[in-house]
Image (tube, rainbow, N blue to C red):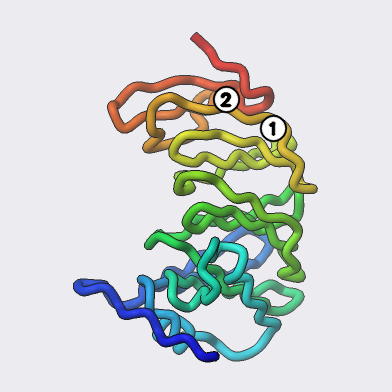
Amino acid sequence: MTSNPAPVPRGAREPQSRVSDFPGGMHVRATWGSSGQAAAVFALSEQGGVLIDHGALGAGADGDPDRLCRMELRVETPAGAWAVRLASTIYDEPRALYWDAGQLFVAGYGFAVYAFGARSGDLIWSHQAGTPIVELIASPRFGHVIVQSEIETWAIRPDGEVRWRLAHSDVVAEAALMGGQLVLTSVSGETQAIDPATGSRHA
């Protein structure tokens, strides 16, 4: 049985694209759109390299990822190119970083975070959050990547194991490393400082 394409929301923008360069000679292009725009997003695909669709991981209970918001991430490295397609139940601008210590390319999209082998594009681990991903942070000073969602902070090791986790009573709007501390700013403007290595809160 073939499902019908989801209607494109009224007022939806055309698919968006962003090109970024990362250390190690990595050239990355992300293209994303609203629900029902899968065909338009994928029409911008470039040829060459391995392409894997992980849409089912972000689709939740929806059996057809193409009815949701879709994103394609293409990564060109000195060893070759690879691309992945992801899905989200909400419209979201993807965020990504190259984690040199773990040799991973980490992408946050919607409610999920995905870690891919930087050179191969293999999915190493994925992490599902209960609220949208706000920020991804990595530093050689600690052996994990920090995943910040609206109400939780996770420290995730290169193998996908959660090192520590914190829950927050207010919605987090921004997260950044400042003076060696992880500083979170809530939607109400309040800030809190956290030790990024241990997750300990500072007064």
Tell whether label 1 touches label 2 (CB within 8 Å): yes
- The tag on residue 97 is none
Question: Disc 2 designates what residue?
Answer: 180
Name the residue: 61% across, 36% down.
154
Q: In which quarter of the image is the N terminus?
A: bottom right
- Position in image of residue 28 (x %, y %): 55, 69
In the image, is residue 170 above or below residue 145? Answer: above
Q: Which residue is drawn at 43% across and 69% down?
A: 69
Q: In this view, does 130 lie above or below 178?
A: below
60 or 110: which is nearer to us?
A: 60
Q: Residue 141 shows which numbered tag? A: 1
In the image, what residue occupies the spot 79% across and 48% down? 159
On the picture, is 168 further left or further right than 186?
right
Count neighbours of disc 1 (C-alpha within 10 A) and say few if under 14, some if 14 to 19, many if 20 or more: few
**Residue at left 62%, top 76%?**
53
Count the labels in the image.
2
Q: Where is residue 195 in the image (x, y as percent from the top left)?
A: 60, 22
Q: Which amino acid type is marked by label 2?
A: Gly
Left or right relative to 36: residue 82: right
Tell me which label, 2 or 1, sits earlier in the chain.
1
Position of residue 94 in the picture relative to residue 27 (left or right):
left
Q: Position of residue 150 (x, y in %)?
A: 44, 39
Q: Which residue lies furthest to the front in this view?
A: 1
Quadrant in which residue 106 is drawn:
bottom right
The image quarter in which residue 4 lies: bottom left
**Residue kind at label 1, given as amino acid type:** Arg
**Mark 2 burial class by Cα count in 10 Å: few <14, some 14-19, many 20+:** some
- Report x, y in % for residue 110: 47, 56
Task: Give the SS element for disc 2.
Answer: loop
